[in-house]
């Protein structure tokens, strides 16, 4: 498939995110909320507990994600002492949109912050399978590498989990190596 994309010229044909959508996902906290609600619906209280945050602060972020379609409210349920609870589930919309270049910096920063926080929560750095590679690429090679990243991520996002599947996160980055110039 990568060869097919190369011969056609790589085009990201996902719809462009609106300003509100782009701003909604340009937050490490909101990216973490989406990750927490990816496989199972969670209430605001459950999200706040997992993030170690104030429920009122989390509710602000949850509402922003619901308003922009990144989280969907699920069927209301009765909680402790008869309270009304609304669980939320990620819609995977963030994967279906493309951000305008003016938002890349904010999103990259948010992704890196979310990654660092999630890795720190593991408590054991040896649980992170990581590698690093220095490359020299011309513009066409750089475009090919980024196109292959997109193809790989699309293929991985389409995997249907088996009954014993465990949750994993994948973080990949390519950046100029300023120290080698």
Image (cartoon, rainbow, N blue to C red):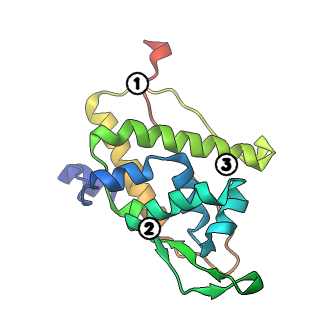
Front one among 94 and 176: 94
Dot 1 and dot 3 residues touching (CB under 8 Å): no
Q: Residue at x 67, y 48 (%)?
A: 118
Q: Residue at x 40, y 61 (%)?
A: 95
Q: Residue at x 71, y 83 (%)?
A: 79
Would you say residue 103 is visible in this rendering? yes
> What distance separates the C-alpha of mark 2 from that of mark 3?
23 Å
| Residue named by callout 3 | 118
Front one among 87 and 170: 87
Mark 2 Cα shell of 10 Å, populated few (<14), some (14-19), many (≥20): some
| Residue named by callout 1 | 136
Left or right of 49, for residue 69: left
Left or right of 7, for residue 163: right
> What distance separates the C-alpha of mark 1 from that of mark 2?
42 Å
Front of the two marks 2 and 3: 2
> What distance separates the C-alpha of mark 1 from that of mark 3?
30 Å
Q: Secondary structure at mark 3?
A: helix
Where on the picture, by quarter, is residue 176? top left
Where is residue 170 shown, x and y percent of the image? 57, 52
N-terminal label among 2 and 3: 2
Left or right of 63, for residue 114: right
Where is residue 78 shown, x and y percent of the image? 67, 87
Q: Which mark is residue 127?
A: none
Q: Is residue 178 above or below residue 169?
A: above
Where is residue 121 shown, x and y percent of the image? 74, 48
């Amino acid at each position: 498939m990568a060869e097919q994309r190369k011969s056609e010229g790589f085009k990201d044909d996902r719809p462009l995110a609106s300003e509100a959508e782009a701003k909604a996902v340009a937050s490490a906290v909101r990216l973490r909320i989406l990750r927490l609600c990816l496989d199972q619906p969670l209430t605001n209280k459950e999200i706040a507990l997992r993030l170690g945050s104030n429920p009122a602060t989390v509710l602000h972020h949850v509402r922003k994600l619901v308003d922009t379609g990144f989280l969907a409210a699920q069927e209301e349920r009765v909680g402790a002492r008869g309270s009304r609870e609304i669980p939320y589930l990620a819609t995977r919309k963030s994967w279906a949109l493309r951000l305008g270049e003016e938002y890349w910096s904010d999103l990259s920063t948010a992704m890196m912050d979310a990654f660092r926080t999630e890795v720190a929560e593991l408590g054991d750095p040896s649980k992170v399978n990581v590698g690093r590679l220095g490359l020299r690429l011309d513009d066409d090679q750089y475009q090919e590498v980024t196109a292959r990243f997109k193809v790989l991520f699309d293929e991985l996002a389409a995997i249907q989990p088996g009954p014993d599947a465990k949750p994993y996160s994948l973080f990949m980055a390519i950046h100029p190596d300023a120290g080698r110039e």
